[in-house]
Image (cartoon, rainbow, N blue to C red):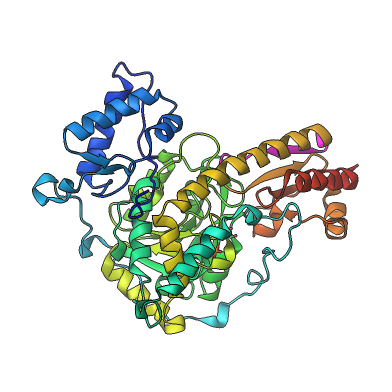
Amino acid sequence: MAKSAPDISLTFIRLEKSLKKPLYIQLYEAVKEAVLSGMLKPGDRMPASRNLSKDFGIARNAVVKAYEQLMLEGYLGGKTGAGTFVSVLMDQPEFLPQRNKITRNDVTPNAGLFSPLSSNRFQSPYMGHDSSCEQRIPFQNSFPAIHEFPFKTWARIAAELYRNIHTLHLGYDHGQGYLPLREAIASQLRISRSINCEAGQIVIVNGSRQGIHLISEMFVRANDQCWIEDPGYTGAYAAFSRAGAEICPVPVTAQGIDLDYAVANYPHAKLVYVTPSHQFPLGITMPLQERLRLLKYAEEHQMVIIEDDYDSDFRYNGRPIPALKGLDTKGHVYYVGTFSKSLFPALRIGYIVLPSPEIAGRFALAKAITDRQSPVIDQAILTEFIRSGHFQRHLRKMSTLYKKAQDELCELLRLHLQDQVEVYPADAGMHFVIMLKDVSKTDFLLQKRASAGLVLMPIDNLSLKFKMPGYFLIGFTGFTIEELKSGVMILKRLLG
Ligand SMILES: Cc1ncc(COP(=O)(O)O)c(C=O)c1O
């Protein structure tokens, strides 16, 4: 197998089965367009026809026919046994139309970088321990299926790296992070999240928390209004709060953050933090129309949008929606990603996609003030893990496993607790939400959960103003079916 490129998925392509145009022609045209626009890069490895036909729910023959035509025309190339690649001929400048480049002038001119931190408004309630993963207790959230992680492969890559260690891996590295990793991430993002970015726009950080903190440090000054989803991610509130911001809780509707409410109540906001792919914690996917509205508003009002795409790697229903950053032509979206969910949280590798390499350079300087750079060896191991196709394979395996776990857990909850809880399965991610039909049992459950052997996070712990009593977050990914079953039985006993 070729080691130079990851096995990609073409999630940004849509095929319309209702159209008269044959599916293989639709696929052929979409890939051709992606190559010409630069979404697919020379050397990118195309998915195997078998996988693609499964992903799109179309006949394998249709994929083979589209690939053959693209090869004939020189867009794709390949070697027997090595896979199909975007042709290197596509690297010739005369072959490609000029892609939209983001210039320095397009970038949000607000907010002086290195804004002073004003600690007088610092509040600490969100800084506490947030139930990470020392122990496996159902229904702990943010807990990947560590027992299924391919540690042997990881260890083999690490051993090989140490055997052939290069001074490059042992000294001070580029503050933006290990270049091959940034290249691999950019390639993944172009393909799976429709984000047209380059390695130069990426800064590697120690988890998305550090990314959010850095953005806050750069843009938020004392008393700046910051819109946050409520309920939402406490790690983000903590960062803005620490910078002295005026935290502006905005309710979440079935369309994601309530833009009308935000505009009516906090018209002077400078920054908005959102989780549009899978709202944390309610699990809502922001529809395209709302994304465009938010972008337009941010452009008109010179706002910074932080897009936290923390767990979009796992999708169970429907095709992945392109990231908000993929729609951003003016450089208002600061995209934050992490490997904490797709691999494991202790790795502490995340990244920010900045509007331009120049801004990325300034972020690297700000990061360097506190920790100079993220650990290079872990980044190098991760790079090889991605390049040799193990990352995509792991994501596919985990998606199947997580879907099964969620389906079985929902079934068990319905079977044993039908009269007690309402279940809201998630289309994506690693948790879902349940609601107690009898809200008066909330306090009893909160008192008894820990001693009974359950982790049950009330949504109210994640909300500032818009409380949702009786709603709880259920993590389902880190446990065997047996462990989930025992969790349901404990819950049944407590609610019984
Ligand atoms: C909404 C959200 N963003 C990001 C993260 C991950 O943070 P990190 O990458 O720092 O581990 C979490 C973890 O629980 C989260 O819930």
Residue 188 locus on image (x, y percent): 38, 52
Q: Could you tell me if residue 21 is visible in this image? A: yes
Is residue 291 placed above or below 220 in the rendered structure?
Answer: above
Task: Please check the rendered image and state whether residue 157 is part of the magenta-colored stretch, yes or no.
Answer: no
Nearest to the observer: residue 104 or residue 96: 96
Whether residue 277 is visible here, answered yes or no, is no
Q: Ligand 1 appears in which quadrant?
A: bottom right
Q: Quadrant of the C terminus?
A: top right
As rendered, which of 19 and 49 lies closer to the eye?
49
Describe residue 192's horizontal placement relative to residue 277 as left or right: left
Answer left or right for 348 relative to 193.
right
Is residue 420 inside the magenta stretch?
yes
Where does residue 418 sit, x and y in percent of width and height?
Answer: 80, 33
Q: Residue at x 83, y 35 (%)?
A: 416
- Out of 461 and 494, give the one closest to the viewer: 494
Q: Reply above or below: 88 against 128.
A: above
Q: Residue furthest left?
A: 94
Q: Is residue 401 left or right of residue 116?
A: right
| Quarter location, residue 35 | top left
The count of marks equals 0
Extreme residue toward the top, this view = 20
Residue drawn at point x = 32 percent, y = 75 percent: 362
Q: State the image coordinates of residue 391 (x, y, percent, origin top left).
A: 47, 53
**Quadrant of res 142:** bottom right
Q: Give coordinates of residue 403: x percent, y percent.
A: 61, 39
Region of the chain picked out in magenta, as a range:
417-428
